[in-house]
Amino acid sequence: MYIITQNDQTNIVEIKSASQGVYAKVCLNDGGSLQELTLDNVPLIVDLAPLTYDTTYASAILFPFANRIKDGQYLFNDQQFQLDPNHKEENNALHGLVYNKTFLVTHQSADKQGAELIMEYDYQEVEDGFPFPFLIRLKYTFTQTGLDIDVSVVNTSDTTFPFTIGWHPYFLSENLNNSILKFESEHKLNIGHRNIGLDLEPISPIDSVVLKNKNLDDCWQLKGTDVGFETPNYKLILSSSQANSFLQVYTPPKEHMIAIEPTTGVSDSFNNNIGLKFLKSKETFDITWTLKIHTN
């Protein structure tokens, strides 16, 4: 039986199933982010201490922009906007506006087969840099060997707004040097000064990246919708419901961890327009990320 518990003091929700080897921890105050995840007794997402959430953005939902906006500035409908450059060292706006907001649980259910947790955040106290109200809803569905993350965004403003969206999980491998990423790509993002995306460059087609002795902070345009992560003790498939999307990969300063980030856009999408989408007033955008594991 799955059990869901919420600590009203810490605003942390835990999902457990001893019989299926499942454990998850969701931090409502940190954008509803999934801070820990074990499926089928395999730890996949773990605490990154001593690294802190305000520097790692671990498992954050990145909206209304994934990655960076140069100087926090962008032009939309002939109007200049200024976002808070929250990445002070680079003077860039980084990873959107909901990663540090408090989400409210609106529904939960659990039975012998799995658990479901739904939460939302209503962006009404708008910032000058993004003066467009929206409602974002997250639904986490847990099973013994899988996780679905369904994200819905409703444009509650009276005008169209630009956006990209992403998810920023870090995965654990017992030996990253003996692990491999599998995905198909023919284009890679050219990243310039201060980690700002410039343009997409054609590359020789690839179907995998061997991680041995690799330090990565790279972005590829995906040909398909699946990304594989093969480690010594498990294989993982991360799928997106959105075609023509991107994969950001980052190795943090913590052993055996790697960020595998599905996104619909790239660094500085609001200015370079790579992957940039637009959501009309009162319309809804939906995306699902699906994670499946197979133990070795």
Image: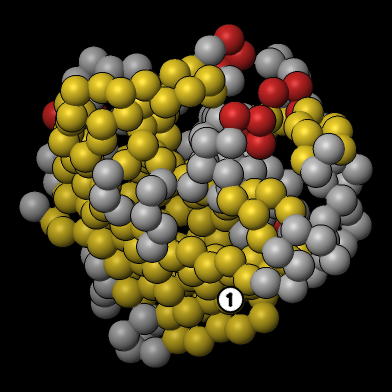
Indicate whether 178 appears above or below 263.
above
Camera sees residue 181:
yes
Q: Residue at x 76, y 67 (%)?
A: 281
Observer-nearest of 108 and 14? 108
Single out the residue that lies furthest toward the left.
296
Q: Residue at x 40, y 41 (%)?
A: 246
Indicate whether 60 appears above or below 6.
above
Observer-nearest of 66 and 223? 223
Q: Position of residue 138 (x, y in %)?
A: 58, 68
Asked which colour scheme the image uses, the reply is secondary structure
The residue labelled by disc 1 is: 118
Indicate whether 40 appears above or below 202.
below
Q: Position of residue 90 (x, y in %)?
A: 68, 16
The quarter of the displayed image where residue 89 is located? top right
Observer-nearest of 77 and 167? 77
Q: Residue at x 23, y 15 (%)?
A: 213
Q: Secondary structure at mark 1?
A: strand
Camera sees residue 8:
no
Q: Residue at x 64, y 49 (%)?
A: 163
Q: Position of residue 137 (x, y in %)?
A: 63, 70
Image quadrant containing the N terminus:
bottom left
How many other residues sit within 10 Å of disc 1, few (<14), some (14-19) or many (≥20)? many
Q: In the shown orientation, is residue 252 left or right of residue 207?
A: right
Single out the residue that lies furthest toward the top.
193
Q: Position of residue 107 (x, y in %)?
A: 61, 84
